[in-house]
Amino acid sequence: MNLVDMGDGERQYMRVPKENAEAVMGKLVDAGLIDEDAEVRWEGDFVSFPLISGLSPKN
């Protein structure tokens, strides 16, 4: 999994392999990191979930 800036200003996305997308989406929703109705981006073998604004990644 990767956090990526996809050029949407401050919006960050969590990029995961498509075979893990459903499980990861559920965990992200439960953790309050994404909106359940968020529009995801399909990119070949990966899915990118938009993170809720104002969250910052841990280093």
Image (cartoon, rainbow, N blue to C red):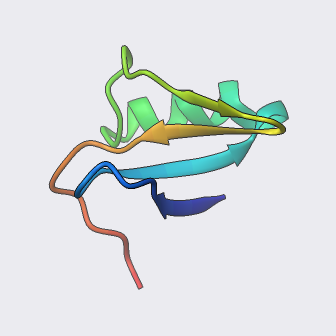
Residue occupying image coordinates x 51% and y 27%:
40
Residue occupying image coordinates x 84% and y 38%:
45
Left or right of residue 43: residue 45: right
Left or right of residue 3: residue 29: left
Residue occupying image coordinates x 68% and y 46%:
16
For the N terminus, give its image quadrant. bottom right
User: Which corner quadrant of the image does residue 43 belong to?
Assistant: top right
* Residue 36: % across, % down: 38, 19
User: Which corner quadrant of the image does residue 51 belong to?
Assistant: top left
Q: Residue furthest bottom?
A: 59
* Residue 31: % across, % down: 37, 41
Q: Nearer the viewer, residue 15 or 27?
A: 15
Q: Work out whether 39 lies above or below 1.
A: above
Q: How many marks?
A: 0
Left or right of residue 30: residue 27: right
Q: Nearer the viewer, residue 38 or 36?
A: 38
Q: Residue furthest front?
A: 7
